[in-house]
Image (spheres, coloured by chain):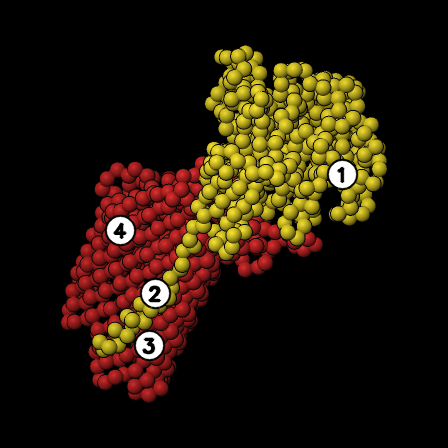
């Protein structure tokens, strides 16, 4: 399960309590919350099956605990917060070295597939925020989200990753009349992933890293020593900064709209004089999130467009007489341009039946002189669900799921005829990832949530969920046709 | 509300347009080949151009004026030429390199380059194999005492190896090299010497090598190393030679089997500190020369022949070994530090380098000259192809000729090895030392 999905799932829990809903990121809108509510949950989850991306595990276990709450302290002040911890263990994992390969414009892979091993990951989430009403018309808010994680692989070649994600939102809202609330917010986000390699076993083997600069095209280098793109003696950082903001408009508390844009820039490497900055990248994200509740109908629409451009720095090490070795930059090449367009649309009626449709379109062009590769992948998903509450305590949900897609994993070209090249195409990973993104599969999920008798002022519940998805054709590259997920959660609201 | 939305979208578009990255434009560069002070006006000479991380190699041929043209993205490149021709019935090899070319549109200096070619003299005696990277040992680590070098007679006539000497330049390929000046050139690039370090070894007696045959010289331990380290080699054969220990070189790794006669012992007079001959086990720069032993002894005894660029005293000085006496060399770059490595031999001695990973039992083995070897009538039906002992699976190199030299020799073939004066063209990293017998399944 990727880092982003873990975070999203926990935020969704929090969002379920928030009257502002997941549409609005401006913390000033938390001012509309009344009273107080809190929720705490423990969960355990088991996933098995071969329908996984190259960063996934065919046999994984996850457990976690989270607590989130909001509390109106006074007429003017609302506090909200969240604490979460997640533990993940995945067997037979190799391939992607970074924690969330979708997040970065450059990725690292283990060249050999026979070095798969068990990965462990722990994630901590902390969020706090405040909304303050200055006057009947004006409110302001601030929220800080902090996520930290560490991941380790326990088989050579071993990689140790640490992750930090700091996300700060500050905003204001203005009540422009009885029905309309407008808002504006600013956002600053900073992520840092440090990665370090290690070989602890006997040293009669060599291990290699494949650097995927786009479309699974890149170079292979040995994992050894201080000077590699992933070092065995120190951690190398992948850094991202996001700056941006959003504008909100909420009508009657039921029609919520947010337009957002963020500028992104980052780099991989160190900024010191004796260590290189391998890549610099920048991009933009913009989009719209909206939801409408009209009588028995509820709709939500998310549209997001993101592009990123990755530049590789060319450098050499030089040692001026009598001085230490320094890095001398000799040029730069744009190696990747990628655009991602995502949409999701949800409709539900009386909270009893609904449909959720999603799409993601990736269009990227990798350029590693003299070779080039274009990739276009479209992934579509659909989730049709029904919900029924029995005996006022038991809620049953049934989902029918389908995922499929199409595209072209590799359209290759060459701008010059090379006598030899060490640029490689990591075909086994490319084919497996493409099949994961596009292979048609269908399945279902059955969930049940049972409200238990109240204990004091708390309302405990237990929920279980079982999901199974199966490919509709025999897979060519994926190592299994099915994927099963079983989840159990214990929680309480108060 | 509408005005609000339009303003927002306009702001987003501005942000997008300001976010454009300008692609670097390709640069057309020219490389003019020179032979001494004259233009090497030969059409059709292949010139290879590689980017510095060795991601790709492009090739172009020269026009009638000896100019090769490429179109590449700005960056740092290196170029090399290895051109074989014949003149008056004699085979000539021209070799040249430009190790660092900074390409950009900034000025003519970054678009037009000149490469000086050297005529490579074909030698009768060559380094056939150099094994000193060590082999794995249980439970961990590597064993280095089993180093050896093989000299080979690359011709059909008996060779006189009496005056062959062995020397090395100091340091690892990626170490700080104080022989580079501020402009990035070796200070002895145009001098008539190279800075030998530690010691220069001589046979001290008449040594001959029959046609297409070899002699093995153990650098430290001329013993059966496999008795203790199964991944190592057996250097105890009576025909092998040994660089013997002396009053200064008395490290415990100097051992010799009783099989080896004292007449097969090499000797030296160390001129730098150390209890053993000092050479890198991950990226050596080794050479062989031709100089009578008496002349070697006189050379190292006279401090007037010492170079003190690195510093004074027996830790720092080097002996100026004459380039005219160098008959072969091997420049090795460390595989985990290629971009930080610099050549130690000047371009008139050697161009290019071979990449090496130590501690795995790999060896550096000379490539077969396919054309010359196949041309020998006596080789008909004896050459074994589909060479599988290269190390390309571990990002190493292999013999491009495809001929399995050892298997062919076992069948009675006469191998002629390549000599282009470019270590990268002439050598590859072989998976197993040739003296190590292959396990039969």
Q: Nearer the viewer, residue B223 or A474?
A: B223
Identify the residue under disc 4.
A378
Ranked by sequence position, the earlier of labels 2 and 1 is 2
Look at discs 4 and 1 and give the one toward the viewer. 1
Residue B226 image position (x, y, % from top left)? 65, 25
Dividing the picture into quadrants, the one containing residue B14 is: bottom left
Q: Residue at x 68, y 53 (%)?
A: A321
Dividing the picture into quadrants, the one containing residue B307 is: top right
Rendered image: mark on residue A322: none
Q: Secondary structure at mark 1?
A: strand
According to the rendering, which colour does chain A have?
Answer: red
Q: Nearer the viewer, residue B118 or B147?
A: B118
- Is residue B204 at least partly visible in the picture? yes
Question: In the image, A149: left or right of B331?
Answer: left
Look at discs 3 and 1 and give the one toward the viewer. 1
Do dots 3 and 1 share one subunit?
Answer: no
Question: In the image, B320: left or right of A278?
Answer: right
Residue that lies at the very extreme toward the bottom in this rendered image: A135
Identify the residue under disc 2.
B16
Identify the residue under disc 3.
A184
Instruction: Chain letter for mark 3, please.
Output: A
The alpha-carbon separation of the residues under discs 4 and 1 comes to 67 Å
């Amino acid at each position: 399960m990727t880092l982003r999905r873990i975070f999203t799932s926990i935020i969704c829990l929090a969002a379920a309590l928030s009257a502002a809903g997941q549409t609005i990121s401006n913390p000033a809108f938390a001012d509309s919350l009344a009273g107080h509510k809190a929720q705490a949950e423990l969960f355990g989850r088991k996933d098995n099956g071969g329908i996984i991306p190259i960063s996934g595990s065919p046999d994984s276990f996850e457990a976690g605990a989270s607590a989130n709450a909001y509390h109106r302290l006074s007429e003017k002040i609302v506090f909200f917060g969240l604490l979460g911890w997640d533990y993940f263990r995945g067997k037979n994992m190799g391939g992607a070295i970074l924690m969330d390969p979708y997040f970065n414009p450059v990725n690292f892979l283990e060249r050999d597939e026979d070095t798969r091993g068990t990965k462990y990951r722990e994630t901590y989430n902390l969020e706090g925020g405040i909304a303050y009403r200055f006057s009947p018309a004006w409110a302001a808010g601030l929220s800080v989200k902090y996520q930290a994680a560490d991941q380790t692989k326990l088989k050579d070649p071993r990689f140790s990753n640490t992750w930090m994600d700091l996300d700060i939102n500050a905003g204001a809202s203005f009540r422009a009349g009885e029905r309309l609330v407008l808002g504006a917010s600013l956002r600053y986000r900073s992520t840092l992933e440090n990665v370090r390699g290690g070989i602890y076993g006997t040293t009669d083997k060599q291990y290699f890293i494949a650097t995927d600069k786009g479309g699974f095209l890149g170079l292979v280098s040995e994992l050894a020593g201080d000077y590699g793109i992933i070092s065995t003696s120190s951690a190398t950082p992948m850094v991202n900064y996001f700056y941006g903001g959003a504008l909100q408009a909420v009508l009657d508390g039921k029609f919520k709209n947010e337009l957002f844009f963020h500028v992104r820039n980052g780099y991989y490497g160190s900024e010191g004089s004796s260590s290189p900055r391998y890549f610099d990248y920048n991009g933009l994200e913009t989009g719209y999130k909206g939801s409408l509740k009209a009588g028995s109908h509820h709709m939500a629409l998310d549209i997001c467009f993101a592009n990123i451009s990755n530049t590789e720095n060319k450098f050499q090490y030089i040692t001026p007489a009598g001085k230490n070795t320094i890095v001398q930059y000799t040029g730069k090449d744009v190696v990747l341009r990628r655009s991602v367009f995502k949409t999701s649309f949800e409709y539900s009626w009386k909270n009893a039946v609904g449909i959720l449709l999603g799409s993601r379109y990736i269009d990227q062009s990798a350029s590693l002189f003299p070779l080039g590769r274009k990739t276009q992948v479209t992934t579509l998903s659909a989730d049709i669900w029904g919900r029924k509450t029995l005996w006022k305590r038991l809620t049953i949900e049934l989902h029918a799921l389908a995922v499929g897609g199409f595209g072209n994993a590799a359209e290759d070209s060459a701008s010059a005829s090379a006598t030899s090249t060490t640029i490689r195409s990591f075909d086994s990973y490319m084919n497996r990832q493409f099949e994961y993104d596009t292979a048609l599969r269908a399945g279902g999920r059955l969930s049940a949530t049972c409200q238990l008798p109240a204990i004091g002022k708390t309302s405990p519940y237990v929920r279980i969920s079982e999901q199974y998805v199966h490919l509709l054709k025999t897979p060519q590259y994926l190592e299994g046709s099915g994927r099963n997920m079983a989840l159990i959660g214990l929680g309480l609201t108060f | 509300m509408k005005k609000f939305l339009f303003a927002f979208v306009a702001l987003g578009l501005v942000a997008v347009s300001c976010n454009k990255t300008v692609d670097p434009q390709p640069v057309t560069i020219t490389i003019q080949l020179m032979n001494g002070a004259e233009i090497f006006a030969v059409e059709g000479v292949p010139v290879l151009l590689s980017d510095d991380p060795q991601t790709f190699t492009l090739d172009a041929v020269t026009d009638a004026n000896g100019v090769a043209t490429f179109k590449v993205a700005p960056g740092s490149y290196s170029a090399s030429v290895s051109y074989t021709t014949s003149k008056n019935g004699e085979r000539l090899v021209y070799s040249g390199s430009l190790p660092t070319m900074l390409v950009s549109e900034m000025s003519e200096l970054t678009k037009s380059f000149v490469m000086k070619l050297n005529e490579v003299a074909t030698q009768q005696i060559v380094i056939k194999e150099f094994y000193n990277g060590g082999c794995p040992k249980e439970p961990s680590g590597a064993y280095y005492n089993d180093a050896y070098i093989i000299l080979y007679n690359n011709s059909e006539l008996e060779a006189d190896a009496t005056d062959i000497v062995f020397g090395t330049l100091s340091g690892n390929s990626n170490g700080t090299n104080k022989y580079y000046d501020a402009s990035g050139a070796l200070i002895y690039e145009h001098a008539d010497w190279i800075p030998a370090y530690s010691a220069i070894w001589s046979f001290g007696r008449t040594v001959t090598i029959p046609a297409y045959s070899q002699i093995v010289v153990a650098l430290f331990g001329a013993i059966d190393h496999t008795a203790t380290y199964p991944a190592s080699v057996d250097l105890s054969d009576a025909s092998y030679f040994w660089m013997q220990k002396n009053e200064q070189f008395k490290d415990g790794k100097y051992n010799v089997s009783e099989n080896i006669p004292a007449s097969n012992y090499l000797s030296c007079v160390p001129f730098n500190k150390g209890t053993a001959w000092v050479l890198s086990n991950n990226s050596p720069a080794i050479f062989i020369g031709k100089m009578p032993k008496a002349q070697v002894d006189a050379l190292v005894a006279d401090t007037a022949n010492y170079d003190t660029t690195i510093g004074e005293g027996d830790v720092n000085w080097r002996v100026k070994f004459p380039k005219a006496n160098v008959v072969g060399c091997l420049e090795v770059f460390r595989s985990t530090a290629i971009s930080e490595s610099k050549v130690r031999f000047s371009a008139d001695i050697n161009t290019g380098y071979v990449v090496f990973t130590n501690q795995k039992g790999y060896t550096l083995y000379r490539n077969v000259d396919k054309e010359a070897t196949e041309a020998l009538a006596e080789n008909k039906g004896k050459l074994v192809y589909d060479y599988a002992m290269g190390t390309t699976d571990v990002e190493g190199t292999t013999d491009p000729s495809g001929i399995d030299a050892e298997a062919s020799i076992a069948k009675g073939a006469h191998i002629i090895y390549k000599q282009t004066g470019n270590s990268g063209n002439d050598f590859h990293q072989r998976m197993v030392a040739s003296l190590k017998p292959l396990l039969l399944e």
